[in-house]
Image (cartoon, helix red, strand yellow):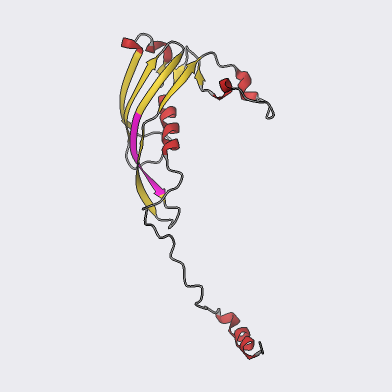
Amino acid sequence: MKAIHIPRLTQAPERTETLEFKESIQGLDTLTPVQGKVRIIHQGNYLEVAAHAETIVTLSCHRCLQQFNYRLSVDPSEMIWLNEADDATEELPLDRDLTMDDLMESLPPDGYFDLQKWLYEQLCLGVPQHQLCSKSCAGIDVEDKNAQVVDRRWASLNALKGQLPS
């Protein structure tokens, strides 16, 4: 996926670009290529981005630790402000209070929108926090705690323990 030149969007019909994709995203381990559709609208001082993307990923169950395939499907939408990014935000002091403007993503109006990076971030956010292979997963089968397994190296000590009065 190529990055989209933001000024080129102003020349598109209705200032909108719609792209269909079916390809692998670098850094994202998937069983199938990521496929879907994205619509980017240039609204003057911000980009309105909406997409639908899906793929299949392999996850590990948090209860039984078995691997399972999961259909990952996301429908993200976001507004990305267009303004000249000041580099001072990169070196903010740790004790400084942040304003709402510091928390918004922005791009330079004459820059590029990296669609692959944006989709990667959205898919990573779509991975479930609590990963279960099924709702009825019983977890790891553990041995009965009442069953005593004695290491042969401790057998003599165990026999001595039985001869002592309680």
State the image coordinates of residue 165 (x, y, percent, origin top left): 67, 90
Q: Is residue 14 magenta?
A: no
The stretch in magenta equals 52-59
Q: Is residue 66 above or below residue 147?
A: above
Residue 1 visible somewhere in the drawing: no
At 45% across and 32% down in the image, what residue appears? 121
The total number of labels drawn is 0
State the image coordinates of residue 87 (x, y, percent, origin top left): 60, 19
Frontmost residue, 125 versus 7:
125
Residue 76 visible somewhere in the drawing: yes
43 left or right, relative to 83: left
State the image coordinates of residue 51 (x, y, percent, origin top left): 35, 27
At 39% across and 29% down in the image, what residue appears? 76
Q: Is residue 94 above or below residue 136?
A: above
Quadrant in the rendering for residue 116: top left
State the image coordinates of residue 1 (x, y, percent, origin top left): 37, 26
Q: Is residue 57 magenta?
A: yes
Query: Which of the image's four quarters has the C terminus?
Result: bottom right
39 left or right, relative to 159: left
Q: Is residue 147 above or below residue 99?
A: below
User: Which residue lies most toward the top here?
Assistant: 11
At 39% across and 33% down in the image, what residue appears? 25
Magenta residues: mostly which secondary structure?
strand
